[in-house]
Image (spheres, rainbow, N blue to C red):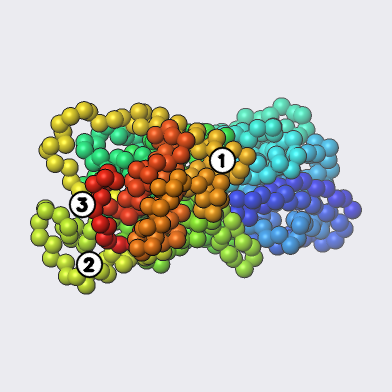
Amino acid sequence: MALAQTWSVALVGLEGHLVEVEADIAQGLPKTTLIGLPDTSLSEARDRVRAAVVNSGERFPDRKVTIGLSPATLPKTGSHYDVAIALSLLTAAGAIDAGALRQTVIIGELGLDGRIREVRGALAMTLAASRAGFERIVVPDLNVGEARLVPGIQVYGARSLRQVLALLRGAEIPDEAPPRAEPRLVSESLIRVPSVDLDDIIGQHEGRRAIEVAAAGGHHLFLHGPPGSGKTMLAERMAGLMPDLSTDDSLEVSAVHSLAGLLTNDAELVVRPPFIAPHHTASLASLVGGGSGVPRPGAISCAHRGILFIDEAPEMHPLTLDTLRQPLESGFVEVHRAAAVAKFPARFMLVLAANPCPCGLAGTNQGICNCTPQILARYRQRISGPIKDRIDIQRQILPATRTVTDGDPPESTAVVAARVLAARDRQAHRYRNTTWTLNSQIPGPVLRREHPLDTASQRLLEDHYTAGRLTARGFDRVVRLAWTLADLAARDSPTVDQTHEAFQLRSGQPLTPLTDLRPLKGPTA
């Protein structure tokens, strides 16, 4: 009897689990058995491995072969175990020295001719191997770029099983034709980061102020107004206002994108906050994540540490939009399956854009709106109250007039981004030694207890709360907004004027000075 082992990685969500791949060759009729909760694609590895081994010039054992994947209770799916199975089997047959595979993790799918095809999630698998203390990992040649993003582990890329065998035997590595990249089924428009500048927008002072505050504090934003008023232009320019990701955040976001198949073959770390803009007809599974077998991350996870922009939000199915409620609060999403629960990070900034009514003319002077009150009510109710209550800033965007072209030229993205970066640095310093970095992340009770507002600001918000213009959740969100405004102004604490502006940003009222404030009316914030 001959027994050998190699190592690979199973992904459950974004979490990697090391899998021991064992091969046992015993006396008996020729038969290959695969055990350890394999799915259909993994069960087919028996035939792929046999063909790849024979076509690579090696001898496949003519005896009873048992392949075990441990831990047996962990569901395993996908074809990236192929190379590990082949090497374990050849080691058991004596074709490879067992010491050559020590401290090495193997991932890759085999073609029938022995070629090694690229796999999804190579970055997350390499991270798992590195954290488990392994020294080396062998990956498909097309996945080398993303695997080498992980520090502290040696990465070897291979185009075929023949090259891997030569590497392990210390022989000259044969030359192979470059592998052909698999077609990607993800729209490039979904993952683009718009290369636009804020100085393209003339006027829209309240809209520009809203996106600056949102970017500085990580606040959710709702822009509504008639078609062509500039809602999408403002939303697309938010990504440029946000600073680069930290090293840890960059690795985390890159791992999500690797699992989703968004990284290119010459992969680099995702250093800029992603801008994900799914169409309003997107399905629930594409937004949250899912799929057969092990769930894949959806759009909200791909927007992790960045922006999720949903244009024409009322046109999205209400049930699909409401699935954002839990991730907005928790910062992650769980996809439950019978075999396992996949957990993906989903701490994103939600930006919604909407027309005032189906025809887009309600509340404007651009024409007569023919929508009945019933149609207006139904249209506005398609964005549910719980979703609106979780949005910090609401702004009406109206078309700019000719008079706005007078005066100073608009600020560029670089100028506003510098203020945003300074504000974020102040927040990071204030919340040092905690798990929070932005005002939008800190729990309301902690913020009120450890960073209280002054007496005048507190009295102002209590008056709004008593009058029913502010909910309990809205109270906390206004306090967070007030601190963001103070950070943008480089102040140590919010003033009553900044608290008043924060309430107006939250309630959607026009921005007016506190001295000009008339008796407040309108919806609850």
Residue positioned 25% across, 57% down in the render: 519
Badge 2 amino acid: Leu
- In the image, residue 24 sits, relative to residue 151, either above or below, namely below
Q: Give the CA distance from mark 1 to mark 2.
A: 43 Å
Residue drawn 62% across the image and 29% down it: 175
Q: Is residue 428 above or below residue 292?
A: above
Q: Nearer the viewer, residue 12 or 499?
A: 499
Are there few (<14), some (14-19), or many (20+) residues within 10 Å of tag 1? some
How far separated are the C-alphas under marks 3 and 2?
A: 16 Å
What residue is disc 1 on? Answer: 431
Residue 227 has which mark?
A: 3
Q: Position of residue 85 (x, y in %)?
A: 72, 49
Residue 174 in the image: above or below residue 1: above
Residue under circle 2?
Answer: 376
Q: CA distance from mark 3 to mark 1?
A: 40 Å
Q: Position of residue 132 (x, y in %)?
A: 74, 43
Amino acid beneath label 1 = Tyr
Q: Are marks 3 and 1 in contact (CB under 8 Å)?
A: no
Badge 3, how many Cα within 10 Å: few under 14, some, many 20+?
A: some
**Secondary element at image label 3:** loop
For residue 371, which quarter of the picture? bottom left
